Amino acid sequence: MDIDKLKKAIEKQREEMTSLGLKYGLTNCHTVKSSQQLDQLLNQLEYISKTKMYK
């Protein structure tokens, strides 16, 4: 995935997670699942950033 697209996906996921947290609470299963999806996106960004740094 392109870094710019990944950053946009991260921002969208962050907004969704925040919205879910406000609506259902921070420990609700929907909020937690959204948080896990955000973690995956952030991990992808970190991996891409590190691999580009060493090239």
Image (tube, rainbow, N blue to C red):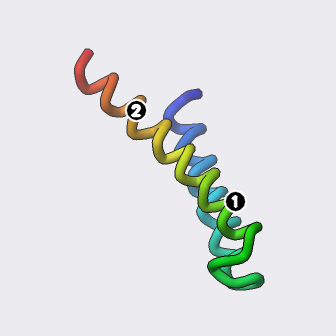
Query: Along the line of sight, which residue is nearer the eye, 8 or 43?
Result: 43
**Residue farthest along the top direction in this orientation:** 55
Kindly identify the residue that appears in the image at 40 percent across and 32 percent down.
47
Image coordinates of residue 55 in percent, x first then y, are: 26, 15
Residue plotted at (69% across, 69% down) = 31
Determine whether the residue tagged by mark 2 lies in a helix, strand or loop. Answer: helix
Image: 35 above or below 31: above
C-alpha span from label 1 to label 2: 21 Å
Label 1 residue SS: helix
Residue at coordinates 55% horizontally, 29% vertically from top-left? 2
Corner quadrant of residue 28: bottom right
**In terms of depth relative to the viewer, which is nearer, 8 or 46?**
46
Q: Please tell me which residue is depicted at 58% across the width and 57% down the height of the picture.
A: 11
Task: Tell me: 52 left or right of 48.
Answer: left
The answer to whether residue 13 is above or below residue 52 is below
User: Which disc, if any, is residue 6?
Assistant: none
Tell me the residue that label 1 is attached to.
33
- Label located before the other in sequence (1 or 2): 1
Location of mark 2 (residue) = 47
Q: What is the quadrant of residue 23 in the picture?
A: bottom right
Circle nearer the viewer, 1 or 2: 1
Dot 2 amino acid type: Tyr
In the rendered image, the residue lying farthest to the left is 54
Q: Which amino acid does the dot numbered 1 rest on? A: Lys
Percent x, y of residue 17: 66, 67
Q: Nearer the viewer, residue 32 or 52?
A: 32
Callout 2 environment at 10 Å: few (<14), some (14 to 19), or many (20+)? Answer: few
Tell me the quadrant of the picture where the N terminus can be found: top right
Residue 8 point in image, percent of width and height: 59, 48
Q: Residues within 10 Å of mark 1 (few under 14, many from 20)?
A: few
Numbered label tally = 2
